[in-house]
Image (cartoon, rainbow, N blue to C red):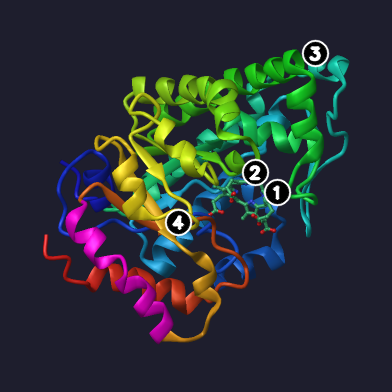
Amino acid sequence: MSNSVFIRTIRGERCERPPVWFMRQAGRVLPSYLSLREKYSFRDLMHNPELTAKVTLLPVQDLGVDAAILFSDILVIPEALGMELNFTDKGPVFDAPIKNQSAYISRLQGDTSKLSHIYKAIDLIKVQKPEDCALIGFCGSPFTTLCYMVQGSSANHFFPDAIKLIYSHRQQTSHLLELITELSIEYAVNQVKHGIDAFQLFETHAGLLPYELYVELVLPYVKRITSAVRDAGCPVIFFPKGLGAGLKQIHYDVADYISVDWQDSMEEARRTVDPRIGLQGNFDPRIFSIDNPNILISELEKYKAFGRNNFNWIFNTGHGLSPDNLFHNVRRTVDWIKTTDWQR
Ligand code: CP3
């Protein structure tokens, strides 16, 4: 068996402590990342496999996390479908968002050669990473990806044009979800073939839909991607942010682990979700912006009882780290997880 506490836990072994990693751990809070960004654009870092491998492994060296997540972005899928994308100071912006043009949708076509640099990066990371560190691959769920493709940017957090399309043009919506799903399956399975240890599906905007509509319209596409990854032998973590009461609709046929957001309660999620599904989460990342170690530690202590009683739990934040989070708080959190006596 592996000597990685992350791999052992996600594969169902009882470990002495929970594994720890963070969403958005590679960019944003690391001084080493920020200094690389003075020299290279985000696109340079994503497109040069050597640089991608280096950035992927920075949080392992600088924070001591148990897993690295591939340094890339969910929006590589719309790019590979033929959409022009810019990463600006205000986030990603598409040159020509889809809005509701069906002619545009029918022109989209997957070009898998646009993803090959990512597989090269995985090969390099596999060689360079420490043995006890796991590598997590990922992609976006078709719905979250569609939100960006239709809206064109994240300037409006409610993605109103995407929601309008979903309610009023169901056939276009399904066509788009289908295109994204097909390419995502190929992309995800290729990541597994190149040796990722786990796969996370990001559904950052699950909370934008009524959960019944989410379950009816989106979940079947999610299941197609997660089933393909699991069939290829790789465990899957699903992060449906904001799904709330809809969590009870996520069954074991969807994922091995569910990542719980910071608005939910771990205890409540544990009572609701199928016991075969492990949980990840859900520390509020905003606490990392407060420069007071007592607050940090007392908030962490709240996870002690949960972690003693639950072996299928991966510590993570309830959403990604942000640039105002303090590096020393994030590092102290990793140390706290590793040095706490979990009495397991
Ligand atoms: O640690 C990591 O950052 C791992 C790699 C990673 C990135 N994006 C790099 C990135 C991952 C896993 C993502 C996923 C992603 N991208 C999601 C889902 C998860 C989430 O955070 O909600 C979404 C919605 C996107 C789309 C996206 N990309 C947005 C909205 C933004 C701007 C805001 C932000 O998160 O910083 C990006 C840009 C982006 N993606 C950056 C990084 C490191 C910032 C680039 C920079 O350095 O300027």
Q: Earlier in the sequence, mark 4 or mark 3?
A: 4
Contact? badges 4 and 1 (CB < 8 Å): no
The CA distance from mark 4 to mark 1 is: 17 Å
The CA distance from mark 4 to mark 2 is: 16 Å
Contact? badges 2 and 3 (CB < 8 Å): no
Q: What residue did someone put label 2 on? A: 47
Question: Which span of residues is magenta-colored?
Answer: 294-310
Q: What residue did someone put label 1 on? A: 43
On screen, residue 66 versus residue 166, left or right, reads left
Q: What residue did someone put label 3 on? A: 106
Amino acid type of the residue that numbered disc 1 sits on in the rendered structure: Arg
The image quadrant of residue 199 is: top left
Contact? badges 1 and 2 (CB < 8 Å): yes
Q: Nearer the viewer, residue 251 or 315?
A: 251
The CA distance from mark 2 to mark 3 is: 27 Å
Can the viewer see residue 109 in this picture? no
Mark 3, residues whose alpha carbon is within 10 Å: few (<14), some, or many (≥20)? few
Can the viewer see residue 75 in this picture? yes
